C-alpha cells in the first residue's frame, strides 16, 4: 500500500470506494491530483495522480513527483495559485472551482477547469484536485464569442432598423433603429412605448396583426405603417416581423425600413407616367383641335369688333354681341383645357420678354368676371410695378387659373357677402400678387395636395385638377414663389412673388411693322391677317416655297410668323434654308404650333432660340410677343443693346 493507501484508505471499504472513484474519473477523462503541504510552507507534495493526470501533463507519475507541482504552473498563473495554496494552509475557505492552465511537457499551455476539495492528511492540510481539459470547450466559447461579435457588428452596421418588442415596449434596437426613432442611442430606446411613434389608427392595426399572429393566422408581410417623429414629421415605415423567445418570454423581432423617400420617388414616377400618357393624348389631338379653333377665335374676335360698325337695330346688335361673346367664351375654355394639358408635358421654351404684370392681371380678371354666378364685391389694388422677365402667355395662364379657382370657390358658398380682392405691388426685388377670396376654403388635407397634378375636389366634368400644378410650374420656371393659405369656410389667400427685371423699362413697339405670315391653313392665315391688320402690315404665304419667293425679291420683314407643321416643307426646314441665305432673319422668327411636340421639334426650338406660340392663341398675346421681338430687333440694330 502506498502513502495514500496508508493515510486515506483506513479500511478495506474506503480503499474500494477510492479505487472506484479513480476508475470513474479515468473513464471520464478527469484528472485526479492529491496534494499535501510540504516540509516548507511554500512546498507542495504530490501524494497521488491518476492515469488521466499523467496524460494531461505528458509525464509519468514519477516524473511529475520529481519535477514538483510548481513546475507545471505557468508563470502568469503562479500568484493566483499560490494564493489558493496559502488559503488551504491557513484553513480558509477556497473557491470550489476555477479556470486556469498548466504547462504540458511539450511547452503548451493547456486550459483546464479545476474543482477543489480540502482534506487533512496526517494532521497536515491537503487538497484533492479534479482536472478537466477545457481546450475544446474554450475553443467553442471563443468561436461563440467571435460569432456573437460578428453578429453584433452585423446588426449594428445594418442599414435597416432591427428591434425586439414585447408589445408595446421596446426591448432592443440597433443604431439604425435608434436613428429611425430619432433617439440619441440604442439604450435610450429601451422601454419606449412604440405607440408614441405610430399614428393612432396604426396602433390599432398593429395590435390586430399581433392578435392574428398569436392565433396562428397568416399575417401578410411586409406591412407599411404610417408613423410620426418627435419633430412632427410624417414617416412611412415598411415593417416585417417574426415571433421569437427573448429573455425568457415571447417577443417580436422587427425589421423596419424608412420608405418615406422611396414612396416620394415612386409618387413622382407615377406622376411621370401620368404625364407621359397625357402627353401622348395631347399630342394626338392638339393639332387637330388647335388649328380650326385658332381661326374660330380669330373670326369671333373680328365679328365682335366689326358688328357695331354695321349699324341696324341696337338691341339686335347687342343681342348678337352677347351671343358672340358666349360663343367665344366657350371656345376660350377649350383653348385653356388643351393648353393646360400641353403645359404639363414641357416647359415653355419661348424667348422671354419684359412683361407688364398689371396689364396681364387686368386682362385675366376681365376674363374671369363672367364666371362669377353670384353678386361678388371685387376690390382691386393693382399698382404699377417693374416689369418681369417672362412669357406673357404663361403669365396670363397663371393669373387666369388662380382667379378662376377663386371664382369657383365663391360660387360654392351661399352667403350675402362675397368678396374677391386682387392686389399687385412691389415687395423688394419681387412683384407681389395677392388673390384673396371669401369662398369655401380648404381643409389642411386638401391644402397639402393643391399642387399635385390631377388632384381636384370638384365634381366630375368640372375640373381636371391641373390649374394649380401648372401655376406652380410657371412660377418655379421664373424662380418665383407661390404660397396658399386657406381654412374651411374661411376663404383662401394666394400670394405669388415674381422677380422683377433689374432695369424694367417696357417700351411699346412701333406700329405698322412688316410681318410675313407663313401658314398652309388658309383660313388661319386670312383670319390672322385681318386680326393683325390695324397694328402690322401683314403679307401671307401658304407654303415655305411662296415665302421664299417673297424674301428673294428683297422684301424686308421685321417678323416672320411661321407655322411649324406644314406638309411640303416644315417650318424648321424653311428656317434653316432661308437663314443660310438671309442671316439677319435668324432672330426675327416666331413659330406657331398646333400642339404636336416631338424631341426633334423641342431640340430645334432650343437650338434656334426662336420664340413660339401655341394655337389657339389670343391676339393680345401675339401682339405683345411680336412687339417685344420687333423692339428687341430694332434696338439691337441701332446699337442700343
Image (spheres, rainbow, N blue to C red):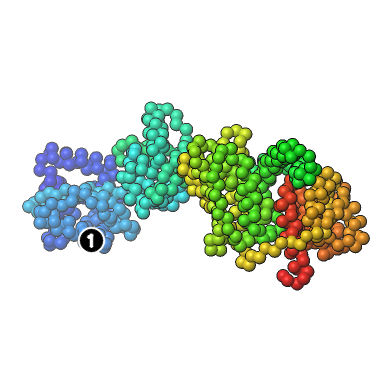
In front: 418, or 153?
A: 418
Q: Quadrant of residue 13?
A: top left
Q: Residue at x 24, y 41 (%)?
A: 23
Residue 426 vertical position relative to residue 621 in the rendered view, above or below: below
Residue 386 vertical position relative to residue 526 in the rendered view, above or below: below
Instruction: Let me know if residue 636 appears in the view.
Output: yes
The kind of secondary structure element at disc 1 is helix
Q: Position of residue 183 (x, y in %)?
A: 37, 51
In the displayed structure image, the side of residue 415 where residue 37 appears, left or right: left
- Badge 1, how many Cα within 10 Å: few under 14, some, many 20+? few
Write down the residue under mark 1: 78
In front: 246, or 177?
A: 177
Q: Residue furthest front?
A: 313
In front: 166, or 35?
A: 166
Q: Residue furthest left?
A: 123
Q: Residue at x 66, y 58 (%)?
A: 355
Q: Position of residue 255 (x, y in %)?
A: 43, 42
Q: Position of residue 290 (x, y in %)?
A: 75, 43
Q: Tell me the quarter of the image containing the C terminus.
A: bottom right
Q: Residue at x 56, y 51 (%)?
A: 380
In the displayed structure image, the side of residue 624 where residue 179 appears, left or right: left
Q: Quadrant of residue 110?
A: bottom left
Amino acid at each position: 500500500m502506498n502513502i495514500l493507501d496508508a493515510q486515506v484508505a483506513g479500511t478495506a471499504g474506503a480503499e474500494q470506494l477510492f479505487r472506484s472513484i479513480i476508475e470513474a474519473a479515468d473513464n471520464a477523462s478527469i484528472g485526479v491530483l492529491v496534494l499535501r503541504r510540504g516540509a516548507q510552507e511554500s512546498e507542495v507534495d504530490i501524494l497521488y495522480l491518476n492515469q488521466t493526470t499523467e496524460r494531461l501533463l505528458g509525464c509519468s507519475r514519477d516524473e511529475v513527483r520529481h519535477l514538483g507541482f510548481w513546475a507545471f504552473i505557468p508563470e502568469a498563473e503562479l500568484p493566483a495559485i499560490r494564493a489558493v495554496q496559502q488559503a488551504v494552509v491557513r484553513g480558509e475557505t477556497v473557491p470550489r472551482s476555477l479556470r486556469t492552465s498548466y504547462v504540458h511537457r511539450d511547452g503548451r499551455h493547456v486550459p483546464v477547469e479545476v474543482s477543489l476539495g480540502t482534506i487533512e492528511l496526517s494532521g497536515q492540510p491537503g487538497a484533492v484536485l479534479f482536472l478537466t481539459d477545457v481546450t475544446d470547450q474554450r475553443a467553442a466559447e471563443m468561436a461563440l464569442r467571435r460569432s456573437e461579435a460578428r453578429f453584433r457588428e452585423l446588426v449594428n452596421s445594418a442599414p435597416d432598423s432591427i428591434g425586439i418588442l414585447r408589445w408595446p415596449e421596446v426591448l432592443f434596437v440597433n443604431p439604425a433603429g435608434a436613428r429611425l426613432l430619432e433617439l440619441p442611442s440604442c439604450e435610450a430606446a429601451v422601454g419606449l412605448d412604440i405607440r408614441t411613434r405610430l399614428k393612432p389608427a396604426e396602433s390599432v392595426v398593429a395590435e390586430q396583426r399581433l392578435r392574428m399572429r398569436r392565433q396562428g393566422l397568416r399575417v401578410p408581410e411586409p406591412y407599411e405603417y404610417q408613423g410620426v417623429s418627435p419633430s412632427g414629421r410624417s414617416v412611412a415605415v415598411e415593417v416585417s416581423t417574426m415571433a421569437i423567445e427573448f429573455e425568457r418570454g415571447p417577443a417580436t423581432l422587427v425589421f423596419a425600413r424608412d420608405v418615406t423617400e422611396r414612396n416620394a420617388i415612386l409618387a413622382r414616377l407615377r406622376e411621370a407616367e401620368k404625364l407621359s400618357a397625357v402627353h401622348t393624348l395631347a399630342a394626338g389631338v392638339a393639332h387637330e383641335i388647335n388649328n380650326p379653333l385658332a381661326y374660330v377665335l380669330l373670326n369671333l374676335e373680328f365679328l365682335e369688333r366689326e358688328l357695331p360698325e354695321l349699324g341696324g337695330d341696337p338691341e339686335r346688335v347687342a343681342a348678337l354681341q352677347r351671343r358672340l361673346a358666349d360663343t367665344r367664351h366657350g371656345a376660350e375654355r377649350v383653348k385653356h383645357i388643351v393648353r393646360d394639358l400641353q403645359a404639363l408635358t414641357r416647359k415653355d421654351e419661348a424667348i422671354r420678354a419684359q412683361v407688364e404684370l398689371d396689364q396681364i392681371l387686368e386682362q385675366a380678371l376681365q376674363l374671369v368676371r363672367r364666371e362669377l354666378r353670384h353678386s361678388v364685391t371685387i376690390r382691386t389694388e393693382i399698382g404699377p410695378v417693374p416689369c418681369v422677365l417672362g412669357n406673357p402667355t404663361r403669365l396670363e395662364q397663371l393669373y387666369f387659373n388662380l382667379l378662376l379657382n377663386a371664382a369657383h370657390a365663391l360660387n360654392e358658398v351661399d352667403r350675402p357677402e362675397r368678396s374677391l380682392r386682387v392686389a399687385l405691388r412691389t415687395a423688394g426685388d419681387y412683384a407681389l400678387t395677392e388673390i384673396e377670396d371669401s369662398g369655401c376654403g380648404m381643409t389642411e388635407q386638401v391644402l397639402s395636395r393643391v399642387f399635385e397634378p390631377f388632384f381636384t375636389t370638384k365634381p366630375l366634368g368640372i375640373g381636371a385638377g391641373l390649374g394649380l400644378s401648372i401655376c406652380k410650374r410657371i412660377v418655379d420656371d421664373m424662380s418665383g414663389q407661390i404660397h396658399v393659405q386657406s381654412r374651411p369656410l374661411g376663404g383662401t389667400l394666394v400670394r405669388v412673388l415674381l422677380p422683377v427685371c433689374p432695369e424694367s423699362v417696357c417700351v411699346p413697339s412701333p406700329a405698322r411693322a412688316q410681318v410675313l405670315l407663313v401658314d398652309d391653313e388658309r383660313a388661319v392665315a386670312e383670319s390672322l391677317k385681318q386680326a393683325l391688320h390695324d397694328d402690322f402690315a401683314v403679307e401671307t404665304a401658304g407654303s415655305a416655297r411662296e415665302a421664299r419667293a417673297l424674301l428673294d425679291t428683297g422684301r424686308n420683314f421685321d417678323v416672320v410668323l411661321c407655322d411649324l407643321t406644314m406638309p411640303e416643307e416644315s417650318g424648321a426646314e424653311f428656317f434653316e434654308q432661308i437663314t443660310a441665305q438671309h442671316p439677319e432673319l435668324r432672330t426675327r422668327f416666331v413659330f406657331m404650333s398646333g400642339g404636336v411636340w416631338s424631341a426633334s421639334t423641342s431640340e430645334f426650338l432650343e437650338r434656334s432660340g426662336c420664340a413660339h406660340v401655341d394655337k389657339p392663341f389670343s391676339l393680345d398675346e401675339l401682339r405683345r410677343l411680336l412687339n417685344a421681338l420687333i423692339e428687341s430687333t430694332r434696338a439691337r440694330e441701332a446699337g442700343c443693346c
